[in-house]
Amino acid sequence: MEPAVSVTILLLFLPLLFLLIYRRSFKRIPPGSLGIPIIGQSLGLLRAMKANTGEEWFRERVRKYGPISKLNLFGTSTVFLHGPAANKFIYTCSEKLLANKQPASIRRIMGEKNLLELSGDDHKRVRAALVSFLKPETLKLYVGRIDEEIRLHLHNHWYGNNEIKVMPVMKTLTFNVICSLLFGIERGPRRDTLVKLFENAMEGVLSVPINLPFTTFNRSLKAREKIKSIIMDLIHEKRKKLEISGISSNEDLIMSLLSMKDQSSDSPVLSDEEIVDNIVVVMIAGHDTTSVLLTFLIKLLAEDQTVYKYVLKEQEEISKGKALEELLSWDDLAKMKYTWKVATESLRMNPPVLFTFRTVLQDIEYGEYIIPKGWQVIWASCMTHMDENIYPEPSKFDPSRLESQATKPPPYSFMAFGGGPRMCPGYEFVRIETLTMIHNLVNAFTWKLSLKDNIFGRNPMPVFNQGLPIQIELKKSSAEM
Ligand code: HEM
């Protein structure tokens, strides 16, 4: 063929080739719509969460588009992924591809240096500092202190009452435990102010990030500034205390973080800004989540007398081996195996964290699709937890499904605490607090639900519309004490 003819053919086909390649890569973006700019599907999801139909909202997406689809959430183009294979991919994916950058609303409220935002060496350093306090070897020394705080809570909020609202009192309990053990903040006006401020901060965590007077986001940012100033005061007080004593201390999390020094340079391991942001994240990540678990657990135990009786039997056995008023120990908690399975089944059915985010740092090929750089990835643990191929009869509360090897869920199917290097570092803390509370509760009280229907929505954590009222009765053996 003449060269001139070849060049002409090439020139004719070049645009066609370009169009084919363009259409092919365009086609490989997951199906779905990005909706209106900035707002996208955020309001639809928030509305569904409020009505407790968030899971249904995600299910509808999967029905319509399959296990991977695109949408726009909280101001960013997003890809939603579903299923254990997706969970495995997310939790084992290199940080160079998928980073833990949260949506702007979360980042601004929790702070730029909070653990959820950090990656690489910074994440390892800050996480190691938190874990050195939250690991079992350290926490096992505090079981008695948590038990004391819980007994005090029961005396202040349960004894002498016939009816209580579970959800608000569980929030008070978990807030007080964290304040005392992690922050070393005494009961009093400072704690009371912080409760209100954290409530305000939480409200904007999943809001559309528009910072104008009277927006939820604006109120949350103001609350964050006030929280920051209180924590800075605490840091100064505790640093002075450490300087006077001249020795490091594990008295509470803040003291422990302030005591940490880099071995080679003797400089602090964490800056004050990192301490503030991580105290905020621990409070937000730790207090509402555990109160949600305890609230659902109390509800499920009221509804299922068989499970309740097994839990009671396990807890009574432990009490039999202890003197009156003797506090629980780490060894006692190790014997509460059945009770923890019940808590785990409760977390499967009602995971406090409905969905989680990551940011895409480079184009990712996932199956037949491309997830573009700059987008975010979102997945929802409730979708895996309610998959009937993994959990037969998923709506049935059945702790026995966790007992035999045959019915145990496969890897990446129980995602309430996340997984991999980002797995929740508060797991042991949650276990101690939950088991200690249930031990004290079933030994001292019986209870039944006051309402037939207990409706709840998400904001973003589950909130019972009427607080989950229950009628309580002090057991004879406790009344005699
Ligand atoms: C029932 C209670 C709890 C549940 C269900 C829960 C759930 C989770 C989940 C799902 C993640 C991973 C999020 C992701 O993959 O991006 C996480 C991370 C985290 N949780 Fe928890 N959590 C609970 C309690 C706590 C407590 C009590 C604390 C602290 C005392 C805590 C501190 C944290 C922190 C700091 C992270 C970030 C970890 C990292 O990025 O390396 N959580 N939690």
Image (cartoon, grey):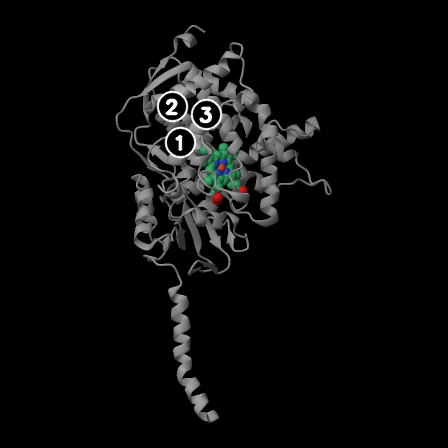
Amino acid at circle 1? Ser
Residue 477 lies in what quarter of the image? Answer: top left
Whole-percent x, y for residue 453 in the image: 26, 28
Does residue 247 lie above or below 32 as drawn? above
Does residue 382 lie above or below 365 as drawn? above
What's the distance in space between the residues labelled 2 and 3, CA to CA? 9 Å
**Of callouts 2 and 3, the N-terminal one:** 2
x 30%, y 28%: residue: 466
Q: Is mark 2 on a helix, strand or loop?
A: helix
Amino acid at circle 3? Tyr
Whole-percent x, y for residue 129 in the image: 61, 38
Residue 473 lies in what quarter of the image? Answer: top left
What's the distance in space between the residues labelled 3 and 1, CA to CA? 13 Å
Mark 1 crowd level (few <14, some 14–19, many ≥20, 10 Å Cα): many
Kindly tell me whether residue 215 is visible in this rendering: yes
x 51%, y 18%: residue: 148
**Residue placed under numbered mark 2 in the picture:** 307
Q: In this view, does 265 lie to the left or right of 375?
A: right
What's the distance in space between the residues labelled 2 and 1, CA to CA? 12 Å
Whole-percent x, y for residue 328 in the image: 53, 18
Is the C-beta of the residue carrying label 1 under 8 Å from the nearest atom of ligand 1?
A: no
Q: What element carries label 3?
A: helix
Q: What element carries label 1?
A: helix
User: Where's the C terminus, which quadrant?
Assistant: top left
Residue extending furthest toward the right: 264
Disc number placed over residue 338 in the picture, else none: 3
* Image marks 2 and 3: residues in contact by CB distance under 8 Å: no
Amino acid at circle 2? Val
**Residue placed under numbered mark 1 in the picture:** 346
Kindly tell me whether residue 156 is visible in this rendering: no
